[in-house]
Image (cartoon, grey):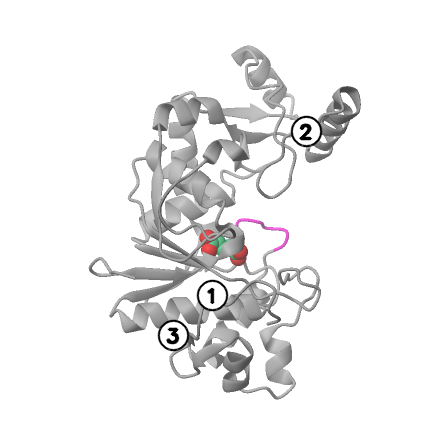
């Protein structure tokens, strides 16, 4: 990996559960790349979800990172303290006619997809994560109808009008120094349209993951986004937002995931083995690095790109 000067890396967990081995791998790789390049390593708490994020999880993350020997530069950024930044970006996109209020719930979208599959016998289009694309029924509602429904308190999110956004931004590329699930690497063209009209602001919030992560990487001057391969496809949305909001474009590096014994990626919600549990069971940092296949427990260097399917 070649470094711009000075490189800035970040680890950006959501404090909504304990960190697991996959987080440890990501944090260790980021930290090692930052320290070996003389760059900065930032910590960011992605805590936009007030129902699931909790201060005790944030404390737990700090404790886990300290145990892993990971130090960070400056004060961590907490997304919940920066809603004004996200609101301003959202309003800019709304003023440009690229964002609209969308009233269908997730259940209604699923039902529309099932109905369409029943009626046409064709599979309904899905995004790279497998969720049905937004049918776009309220993409072109008259302004007065939108205002009236919002005033009446109807629950809604804000979505990006993907067709318009892609027409505005044109063809976009990124530099990938890791690799995607199919080995994609190097200079790549991204395909944000595969995501359909993505949510840019969740119900009752001025942002979604996509908007907050993209803005924060720019605001924090992140030059290298290093994260698990499960977020490879989402990079297309982030690259599109960078183009629409005139933001700098970092280099991306997606690394292999740590998979559970069942071959699926680890998840907090399934209660997969946490760093805390391993520590409390008496494991050392070296045990954990060995288990992750890291060459040097000191530096947290990856031994080799791990093939998906290896147990973590
Ligand atoms: N907050 C995200 C997560 O915990 C990571 C976002 C990112 O690295 O871009 O999965």
In front of the other: 101 or 225: 225
- State the CA–CA distance, disc 3 to disc 2: 46 Å
Q: Between 127 and 77, which is closer to the camera in this rendering?
A: 127
Among the two numbered marks 1 and 2 on one chain, the one whose residue lies closer to the N terminus: 1
Point out the tag, 1 or 3, that comes first from the N-terminus.
1
Q: Which residues are magenta?
A: 48-52
Count of labels in the image: 3
Say if disc 1 is inside 8 Å of ligand 1: yes
Residue 147 shown left or right of residue 106 in the figure: left
Cα–Cα span, label 1 and label 2: 34 Å
What is the secondary structure assignment of the residue under circle 3? Answer: loop
Q: Identify the residue position indicated by label 1 in the image.
A: 26
Residue at 42% over, 26% down: 165
- Magenta span main SS: loop
How far across and how far down the image is residue 261, in percent?
69, 69
Query: In which image quadrant can residue 15 be found?
Result: bottom right
Q: Is residue 168 visible?
A: yes
Q: Which residue is denoted by mark 2 in the rendering?
A: 124
N-terminal of the pair, mark 3 or mark 2, is 3
Q: Report which residue position mark 3 lands on.
A: 71
**Quadrant including the C terminus:** bottom right
Q: Secondary structure at mark 1?
A: helix
Specify few, some or many for label 3: CA neighbours under 10 Å numbering under 14, 14-19, or 20 or more.
Answer: some
């Amino acid at each position: 990996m070649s470094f711009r000067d000075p490189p800035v890396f970040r680890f950006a967990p959501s404090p909504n559960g304990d960190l697991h081995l996959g987080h440890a791998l990501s944090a260790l790789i980021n930290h090692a790349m930052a320290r070996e390049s003389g760059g900065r390593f930032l910590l960011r708490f992605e805590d936009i979800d007030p129902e699931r994020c909790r201060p005790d999880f944030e404390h737990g993350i700090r404790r886990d990172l300290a145990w892993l020997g990971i130090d960070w530069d400056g004060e961590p950024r907490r997304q919940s303290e920066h809603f004004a930044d996200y609101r301003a970006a959202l309003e800019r996109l709304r003023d440009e006619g690229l964002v609209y209020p969308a009233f269908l719930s997730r259940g209604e979208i699923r039902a529309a997809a099932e109905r369409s599959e029943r009626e046409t016998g064709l599979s309904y289009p899905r995004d790279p994560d497998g969720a049905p694309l937004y049918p776009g029924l309220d993409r072109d509602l008259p302004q007065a109808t939108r205002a009236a429904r919002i005033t009446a308190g109807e629950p809604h999110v804000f979505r990006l009008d993907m067709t318009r956004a892609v027409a505005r931004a044109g063809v976009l590329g990124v530099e990938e120094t890791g690799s995607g699930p199919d080995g994609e690497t190097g200079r790549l063209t991204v395909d944000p349209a595969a995501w359909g009209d993505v949510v840019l602001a969740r119900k009752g919030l001025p942002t979604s993951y996509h908007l907050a992560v993209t803005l924060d990487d720019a605001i924090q001057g992140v030059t290298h986004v290093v994260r698990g391969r499960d977020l490879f496809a989402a990079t297309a949305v982030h690259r599109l937002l960078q183009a629409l909001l005139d933001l700098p474009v970092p280099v991306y590096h997606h690394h292999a995931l740590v998979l559970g014994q069942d071959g699926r990626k680890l998840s907090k919600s399934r209660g997969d083995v946490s760093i805390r549990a391993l520590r409390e069971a008496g494991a050392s940092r070296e045990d954990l690095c060995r288990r992750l296949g890291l060459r040097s427990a000191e530096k947290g260097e990856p031994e080799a790109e791990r093939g998906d399917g290896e147990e973590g």
